[in-house]
Image: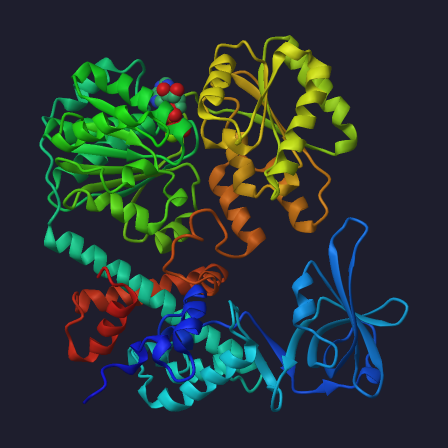
Amino acid sequence: MQEVNNLFNDIRYIKGVGPKRALDFNRIGVSSLRDLFYLFPRRYEDRRIIKKISELKPGDRAAIRGEVRLTHLRRSRRNRPIYEAVVDDGSSSIHVSWFNQPYLKNVVKKGSDIILYGKVNFYRGLRMNSPDYEILTSGDPDMGIVAVYPLSGRLTQKFIRKLVRDQLERYRGKIKEFMPDFIIKNYSIISRVDALINLHLPQNIDTIEKARYRLAFEDIFMIQLAIGMKRVKRKFLKQGISHNFTPDTMLDFKNVLPFDLTEAQERVLRRIEKDMLSQSSMNRLLQGEVGTGKTVVAAYASLLGASGGYQTAIMVPTEILAQQQYIRILEFLSPFNIETGLLVGGLKKDSNREIKRDIAVGEISVVVGTHALLQEDVKFNNLGLVIVDEQHKFGVQQRRILKKKGSTPDYLTMTATPIPRTLALTIFGDMDISTIRETPFGERKINTYWVGTERRRYVYGFLKELVDSGAQGFMVCPRIEDSEDELRNVEEVYRELKSFLGPDRVALLHGKMDGEDKKRIVDEFKKGEISVLVSTVVIEAGIDVPDASIIIIEDADRFGLSQLHQLRGRVGRASQNAYCILLADPKTDEARRRLNAMVNIEDGFRISEEDLKIRGSGEILGIRQHGFISTESLQLAYQNLDLLESIKGEAFELLERDPFLEDSANRPLAEELRSRFRFL
Ligand code: ADP
Ligand code: MG
């Protein structure tokens, strides 16, 4: 019997793995042998030389090997567990401590033979704090430059290393090149098999770099190819819906709007008309900062869909947002007698059942909802348009589930986190992109200041002045890991402000409150009965309060740059002077850079670019969950945008010559592509 492509063998059937370890492997993203070969080590340890403890100097990074002599689990003054050990290698001994890992007492036991790797400190003798360790159970330790993998469950470094080594040995002949020859030559990349071998079993640091480069390169190339293929298919196959509406629709819509569309809005609406009229499916990303008026775009697209008898689903990340969005869409669409519904998790069971029935029979044309829309029993009669707001809050899978509820519905996604164009093209490369840069209210100026917490009183005083003159504001506290701490934190700020401003003018809003209470408080705030809202980041989720003019962000150094910018966007919609005050005593350079960026940069696109620079990787909202591309590859792409452009160019040119990769020379490429992207 002939074995079919061995690399796709399930990891559990590999000798020595078995069903239990297979599950552990699944948890770190490995389900086949191929995944194992592509498992990126988290880092490497240089064990070419194991040092004697007696030769260590403070400041060294070194590997040592010795026996665990004394162990002791104690608690710090703040009641955190500290596990301590003394390790002796015959030449001398060293103190070792690990923080917050009490379970080590069952792992690093007295008498164990251990390898430690870390930085040497000096405090009443030599020490290592939280070094990496490996207990040697049998045989010799792995030496040389060793890969350190992500672990889960019963997996150990030693086990993975041996498995990878054995399997690479066994299968190296089957790891075929798939990148076209000319690419390998022109870009001087190493072969696939060499890259994988060097990734796991490097001879020196240099070979690791070459391996990573090759693998990141192929990653980006394949993505660009996938994007290109999707485009080709979408354009060639024309299998979407051609919506049916009259040319007057725009005029009718404008006539009932309470305001004039901005130029940018109108331009986008015209594009969407074209997209929806066309037989190819629409796949459009609309980016525009908070307040640029994206909802009206969603409403118009729904109107176009409804005109031809198609239903629209609008999915948003939170219940508050869904409610708001629903009310606005309702306002825009009610003159056209379009039935609109709201579907969220928190509604009463009965009314939910009714709404679901109305959706199923097509009574409701436009439904706004949360994740609740994804439930299996939500069935559409004729879903022709899917709109997702803040798509990065949803996973790839969730978006797909929603689209699957129709047959090739058009797709529009909206985001308030603008991303630089090159980046957008890499990530959403198969989408057409529209951007709204202007707000309906013209240029707005938000005066941003960074103030140290020692001047808190002064900031409160400033807030009081504004509030006394009728302004409204937010005070935002950061989300804290421990939700009890979080609550304590907002409550303390709340009490302080109450005593400062007077009890009736301040209200508290936090994630733990139930929906009704939140809604009531937001309503009171809207009506102006409350002046200052103290909250955790729930307000980020889109409470629309047009005339708030000051936002104070507590411990601002704890927020990411994009998030700070989003929060800032919550004020200054009306034309009066608006303020964003960042209260913070940052402790790291990175945090200082973020705060400075906030003070100096107003444009959202430049903020995202700065965010990228500071973080240097794909941590930006929305990319983490993209799911197709590794952080490594993103990093390569960003550090080298020209390279990204030329890889993209190569991929697209290839597709121009051979749109469906049918050429026999491109067959390995086509196979690899299909194995990576099932949807192709
Ligand atoms: P986004 O979703 O992009 O943050 P919204 O759609 O919520 O923005 O719009 C923000 C506010 O601006 C809403 O109150 C909306 O009614 C209003 N608005 C939208 N477009 C215009 C316009 N062209 N002229 C005046 N106000 C507008
Ligand atoms: Mg919006």
In the picture shown, does residue 597 fall above or below 614? above
Q: Is residue 424 above or below residue 523?
A: below
The number of callouts visible is: 0
The picture quadrant where one finds residue 419 is top left
Residue 46: percent from the left, percent from the top?
64, 81
Q: Position of residue 403 (x, y in %)?
A: 22, 44
Left/right placement of residue 233 relative to residue 623 reads left
Residue 255 position (above or below residue 490): above
Q: Quadrant of the N terminus?
A: bottom left
Q: Is residue 185 left or right of residue 145?
A: left
Quadrant in the picture for residue 241: top left
Compare residues 58 and 115 and report the one nearer the observer. Answer: 115
Asked if residue 210 lies left or right of residue 237, the reply is right
Q: Quadrant of the C terminus?
A: bottom left
Q: Is residue 267 left or right of residue 472?
A: left
Q: Residue furthest right?
A: 124
Regarding residue 260, the answer to whether it shows in the image is yes
x 37%, y 44%: residue: 394
- When the figure is inspected, residue 457 is found, relative to residue 669, above or below; the finding is above
Residue 508: % across, % down: 59, 22
- Residue 166's spot in the image, x, y percent? 44, 88
> Ligand 1 is found in which quarter of the picture?
top left
* Residue 341, picture quadrant: top left
Going 46% across and 32% down the picture, which residue do you hit?
541
Q: How is the image coloured?
A: rainbow
Q: Nearer the viewer, residue 238 or 351?
A: 351
Q: Nearer the viewer, residue 130 or 422?
A: 130
Is residue 292 among the parts visible in the rendering? no
Q: Residue at x 31, y 62 (%)?
A: 224
